[in-house]
Image (tube, rainbow, N blue to C red):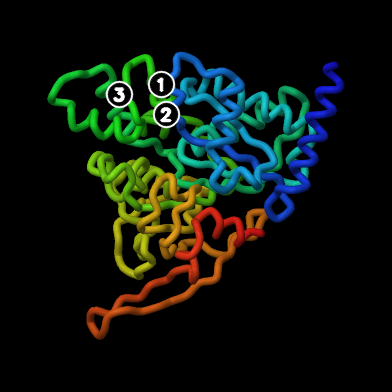
Amino acid sequence: MAITAVFLTAAALLSVQAQAQMAGKNVILVHGLQPAQLMRDSVTPQEVSSDGANYWSAFWGQYADDRLDWSSKSRLNADTAQRAYNKVMQWARTGFCNNGCVLVTHSTGDLVTRYMLDQQDVWTEAAGLQPLNILAVFDFAGAGGGSELADLALDVAGSESWLTAPIRAAVNAWLGFTVTPEKLGVLRDLRPAVARQTAMAPNSVPRLRFVGGGSEYLGATGGFLPGTDDGVVSLHSSCGGNAIKAVDSCVGYRALDGEQTSVSAPDSLWYNHYPVLMGSDTHHGGTIGNQSGVLLSYVNNNLNPGVNVSFATQTTTSGWWLWKSTYNTVPGSDNQTMSNLVFNSVN
């Protein structure tokens, strides 16, 4: 019976691989925070799997060869670490990444992936297996540097004071419920001070960053996030900045809308982190969802970390004389979603 189940699973996986992949490489998805899970008393393995599939339904799910699903009720170094270990062992034993894998993450999935990459050499070596051949990670709205909203959630968990009412309103807008101490889960790991101390050893896997600066939750959260944010994560985190700082772009010479100008940016980025696309009005969920209508600007182009990531580019001007501005953008990017543009650029 067990042999039959394994055979069917392998056959199903091969069938999915034949239809999926990106530039001939297997694609692994790692989702972000799922607030609805925090509200439940428990999350079953079946719910972890179904919620993981639903998370990516807008676009990336159709191109996935596998996923690392995890429960938002779990701390990073507990059940989530076990799930990551199990997946790494599965991929290593089956040779799933022998030809190279590309990971696609969203939000807290950035942090989960960093932990997995930090541990995978140790895990595979202990099992007598080759480390996974991860070519690159595409981080959409990455929260590897944490989110200040997680700090707020811990500050007001269980509070009923009128003094904390504005903060509770922002946290409620984000999570969709009134947070209590027993419903914090991975939020404890998402605090910037904690996230920035998690699995910080540099590694050879390039982290390509795709970021936005659009408002979400009707702007209820933006006032509590430093600098420009996407409604959940500030740019210091999503750009891959190596320190907490109020910034308005990933680079000091180009604004999110592509204007060539002096703008506040991280002093430096974490090792092997490369901002690629920026959308001034792209919000947190829009980076992997159905949001379009935003003309995207680029930072790094023609990257080739085992898969070629390149975009057509254009330079335009507006205004006149002393008020003339120059913009560097991706033509036609406002007619498609950010994720669709990225996928098409690789494929």
On residue 178, the disc is 3
Q: Circle 1 sits in a helix, a strand or a loop, which is it?
A: helix
| Label 3 – label 2 distance at C-alpha | 11 Å
- Residue marked by disc 2: 35
Q: Looking at the picture, how far across and down is residue 285, in whole percent?
A: 43, 45
With 110 as the anchor, is 213 left or right in this view?
left
- Residue marked by disc 1: 39
Contact between marks 1 and 3 (CB within 8 A): the answer is no
Contact between marks 1 and 2 (CB within 8 A): the answer is yes
| Label 1 – label 3 distance at C-alpha | 9 Å
Q: Circle 2 sits in a helix, a strand or a loop, which is it?
A: helix
Q: Looking at the picture, how far across and down is residue 272, in whole percent?
A: 53, 49
Task: Tell me if residue 152 can be seen.
Answer: yes
| Label 1 – label 2 distance at C-alpha | 7 Å
Contact between marks 3 and 2 (CB within 8 A): the answer is no
Q: In terms of depth relative to the viewer, which is nearer, 188 or 13?
A: 13
Q: Alpha-carbon neighbours of circle 1 within 10 Å: few (<14), some, or many (≥20)? A: many
Q: Residue at x 38, y 72 (%)?
A: 327
**Sequence-earlier tag: 1 or 3:** 1
Q: Residue 246, relative to residue 149: is it above or below?
A: below
Q: In terms of depth relative to the viewer, which is nearer, 331 or 267?
A: 331
Q: Residue 44, relative to residue 27: is it above or below?
A: above
For the N terminus, the quadrant is top right
